[in-house]
Image: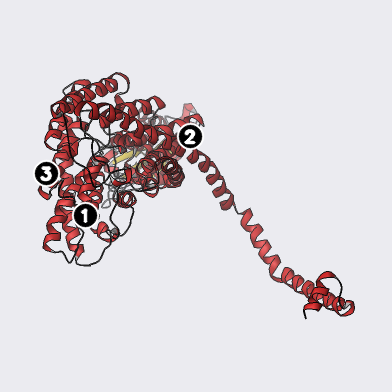
Amino acid sequence: MHAFSAGTASGRGIPGICSRRARRGGCLFLLWLRAVVTHSGIHRMRNRIWLLRSPDIWEGATFLRRWGFIGLLIGVGAGLGALALMWCIEAVKHALLGPIVGYAPPLPGGEGGSGTYAFHMSRPWLLPMVTGATGLLGGFLTWKFAPETAGIGTNAAIRAFHQGAKIGFPTAIFKLITSALTIGGGLTSGREGPIAQIGAATGSGIADLLKLSAHERNMALAAGLGAGIAAIFKAPLAGALIAAEIFYTEDFEVEALVPGVIASVIGYSIVGAVTGFQPIFSLPEGMTEFRHPFALILFVVLGVGCGVLARFLVGVYGRVERFFRRFPLWAAAAIGGVCTGLIGLAMPSVIGTGYGWAQFAINQDLRLIPPAVMFLAALAEIVAASLTLGSGNSGGIFGPCVVTGGMFGGAFGYAVSSVFPELEPHAGNFAIVGMMAFFAAAAKAPISTIIMISEMTGGYGLLAPAMFAVVTAFILSGKKTIFPAQVNSRLDSPFHADEFEPIALCRVKVADVMIHLPVCVNAQASIAEAMGLMGDYGLASLPVVEHNRLCGRVALLATHRVPEEQRRSTTVKAVMSLEWQAAFPNEDLFTILKRFAANDVGNLPIVTPEQPERPIGLITRSGLWSALEAAKQQR
């Protein structure tokens, strides 16, 4: 057998037998191939050719190629912007807090933190001076060069999105500088706000360089916002989702999702390649495991507390912001900085981002922060963040919300785990879910928040209880949001106003815009009289009545066909059309607009259902469009 195989392989052996088998096998193979090609292969080939010719395939490929390139550019810019922001914050922190105050804030586990941290502040009396001085400097730069960078950067990006405004690269540079001063100088702020505005400016700037349309520029702005957040928090999926969710309290910007995905992954990859891909917070092995269904009740109670606390944050921030409006921006920022520094003397967790202290709440490190102190730290974080950002200092609210929710959840978790240890043995899980529930309620962004905190902690094991807590907090927090620039839906966004004109018209009734006067002409009136009436009201046609009942319509064009010398002797009845349409007071304007188009008229008489042939008023096209513009202004 071996010799036959070797001989066949080398072309020797038994030539007759081998050649006959080869020819027979080759013929059988060719017959099989022919059958496949002629019967099924051709049909499959035709199907593939038809798919390639499908316009949807080519349209999708063109969209992906276009936004793949744009998303790549935005992601690179957002990733580099995130790295620059992180380095600038560290540089300011090491230049001010360490040498002057003698304080080194703790770090979260994913950024180099350890369990051996020991709190120490050599010169605490200098802390209010440092925070006040950085507030004064940052406030002066903001007041002098870039007032649009004051306060929460995410809110500024949301406002620019809805207004269709451009965010230039100079805005991004000043936001980076002033935010580095704020966060690195010890004021209570987060990195989300500045990187959101920096990323949005990157997307808007790239769109301008590529000469994209206003609509595409807004999608690029949204993608840049999400990419910046994805990069700095190492949360690519959350960044893509927040690019679609953060602009509305009850809606999504779906078109921003694909560019947001591409830009977020690129931005995350750039930051991860430099700083590592580990999550920001480190957790003990097996901690985030959901074990007992009855623990859901405890997480719902946590959601109730976070919802109430979110209302408190929005209320305090709004009052502080209104108070500081009476001062010049540079003075308000300095006062806010001093007040924040004074709170930091009593509660060091409010200094900077506070992520290291949130790590202690997750780990339940009661040596550094006991449960009662955790609860007080949550309240202090709200007040300090309101003083910092409400006074005009640059930064973001996500970081303070993470610390507040983590502290409140940590204190709550310690209490319930002591009473019900069999339901949830890890009290730190409540700290993680508290982060999600609190920010989701305050920012009205539940889905992206759940994903973001899960990515920041490195696991989805708490997804089920987090959903219960987040939904509860989201509902109980009410309609108010920490981002005043948010609107309810795309229908309420000025940027989408032209897309939703029919819906806007559906909200207005005929009775709201009608002329409360039966503008019409009698059938026995002269042509000249009818023409004069149409000229007075600027109309191209008029309803015709006879014995106070609608009987037709006369058009200006029809009256012009009558010789001028006969217009005083010819009656309207001689030239009018017997066809007429009317409108009811309770009908919406979109229905009337369709009736205008179907009958090619510029006005309609208004009648009541009780007397459908007796006019009580008139509605015109110009009145309809004026009502639409008024509705747009109210949005």
Q: Residue at x 85, y 77 (%)?
A: 18
* 336 lies above or below 635: above
Q: Residue at x 50, y 29 (%)?
A: 209
- In the rendered image, residue 355, in percent from the top left (x then y), is placed at 25, 42
Q: Are marks 1 and 2 in contact (CB under 8 Å)?
A: no
Circle 1 is placed at which residue position?
428
Sequence-first disc among 1 and 3: 3
Circle 3 is placed at which residue position?
376
Sequence-first disc among 1 and 2: 2
- In the rendered image, residue 305, in percent from the top left (x then y), is placed at 15, 52
For residue 198, what is the image quadrant?
A: top left
Q: For the residue carrying disc 1, how many other residues have a C-alpha within 10 Å: few (<14), some (14-19), or many (20+)?
A: many
Q: Tag 3: residue type?
A: Leu
Q: CA distance from mark 3 to mark 2?
A: 50 Å
Give the SS element for disc 2: loop
Foreground label between 1 and 2: 1
Q: Tag 2: residue type?
A: Ser
For this rendering, which residue is in front, 78 or 38? 78
Q: For the residue carrying disc 3, how many other residues have a C-alpha within 10 Å: few (<14), some (14-19), or many (20+)?
A: some
Give the SS element for disc 1: helix
Give the SS element for disc 3: helix
Circle 2 is placed at which residue position?
213
Q: Are marks 3 and 2 in contact (CB under 8 Å)?
A: no
Sequence-first disc among 3 and 2: 2
Q: CA distance from mark 1 to mark 2?
A: 48 Å
For this rendering, which residue is in front, 182 or 524? 182
- In the rendered image, residue 44, in percent from the top left (x then y), is placed at 66, 65
